[in-house]
Amino acid sequence: MTLTSPRPARANADDLQGRFRGVMSRLGPFESNPHLAVGVSGGADSTALAQLCHDWALARGGRVTALIVDHGLRAGSTGEARMTARRLAARGIPAAVLTWEGAKPGTGIQAAARDARYGLMRAWCRNAGMLHLVVGHHADDQMETHLMRRARGDGPGTAGMSAIMEFPEVRLLRPLLASRRHELADFLIARKITWVDDPSNLDDGFERVRMRRRLADEPELADAAAVSLDAAGEKRVHLERSVAEALAATLAVHPMGFAWLDRTVFTSLEGDIASSLMSRLVQCLGGAGYPPAGARVERLMGRLAASGGFSGASLGRCRFLAERDGRILICRDVRNLPMARDASPGRIADWDGRFTVALPTGLGKGAILSPLGVDGWRQLPKDVRRRSGLSLATARSLPALFRDGILSDHVLNHGNGGMKARFRPKNSLAFNGFCVA
């Protein structure tokens, strides 16, 4: 990495702070004496964000903590993370260095690093009781994202990144989406603050870097992208509102993570609303990290709309089964479920992308946490099965405790100190509200 020293600032850089305060007022509400977690890489964008958040929080009797992720992908990354922490501390901003441990993938490294980074920061916020995590994506990032996604098709993703994302642990905020990269650098220059340039930002092996160069070389492309980005944002807000209304009209969700779809109402929906609803539904109930391919969604919708009988189908880790009353049962398939593991007392925040599991004390040796499966279902007494309101299709993918192949008394939500499984999917069923900064 290269340390960048301040150069003469352009005029009007100070007005960034006033606009930042205005955006933060729209992204609230915030608690009294707010404490913000701020993702910081050490580059100009995140360094400016940390300083803006620090100034904003101090004016409200609050404070910030910078979160620096050491991905361990380059020699010297640990030293660079610590250097960034020291530079922040010199300006009164405490920092925590979070380390991505374990083996790194050979391909898709940027996506894997992003997932690891957000996972580490969200876990830190949960453990620290933080309500807000602020990250430094800005207008140039947004434009790049818009054009890259538009090259793959015209869908909700072309609206770019939302200024607010609601997660179970924390609210993710992006207050710089209307601010340009050069404005952030000018702000730092005016404050005589140095930053570090990451050489990976110049690596043409990455799609985003190639798009960044293209935008710099083609000003007319940037102008056109700004217009189409605004239109895509308005379209997404309207689509999300329509999908939320359609979900309320077509779906009934069980607390144990499956649902019934009203086939008649669903097949009457407009195409883009129906496909977006189906993608969200599958991603939520299946626990996958990403939505299913659009072509597969369209094929399933065609089968549901066909005049003949519908017997069943699968999509994105979910099974679709016809019920006698005409509704469609949607439940988790048994593919790609977690492997059996030794059960130790404590909380598992993400068992399979759907459930958090709390394991009680007093399990003793030999306890195994595993999907219930067909054998486990058959071991349940008939009266327990009947009272549960579950079926084999809906129950076999649920977490359960075994000992020597026999279902434990702690099996599932039995109270009295037994195991607790809570449906808390990583992806919410409804969109949590696309927001333009």
Image: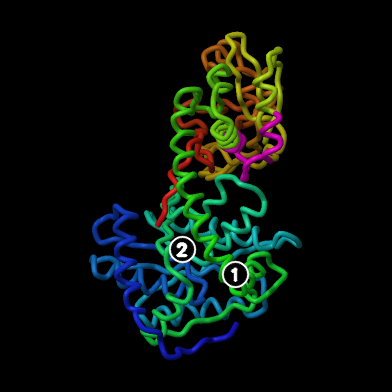
The residue closer to the viewer here, 215 or 26, is 215
SS class, disc 2 = loop
Is residue 294 visible in the rendered image? The answer is yes
Q: Name which residue lies at 58% across and 85% down.
A: 2
The residue at the far top in this view is 324
Residue indicated by mark 1: 215
Quarter assignment of residue 355: top right
| Spot occupied by residue 176 in the image (x, y as percentages of width and height) | 42, 65
Q: Is residue 126 left or right of residue 69?
A: left
Q: Is residue 423 left or right of residue 204?
A: left
Residue indicated by mark 2: 135
The residue closer to the viewer here, 237 or 71, is 237
In this picture the colour scheme is rainbow
Q: Name which residue lies at 47% across and 54% down.
A: 230
Crowdedness near tag 1: few (<14), some (14–19) or many (≥20) residues, C-alpha within 10 Å: some
Residue 126 falls within the magenta-colored stretch: no
Q: Which residues are magenta?
A: 282-299
Compared with residue 69, is residue 288 higher up or lower down, i.e. above or below? Answer: above
In the picture, the quarter occupied by the C terminus is: bottom left
| Spot occupied by residue 376 in the image (x, y as percentages of width and height) | 67, 23
| Spot occupied by residue 63 in the image (x, y as percentages of width and height) | 31, 67
Mark 1: amino acid: Leu
The residue closer to the viewer here, 180 or 393, is 180
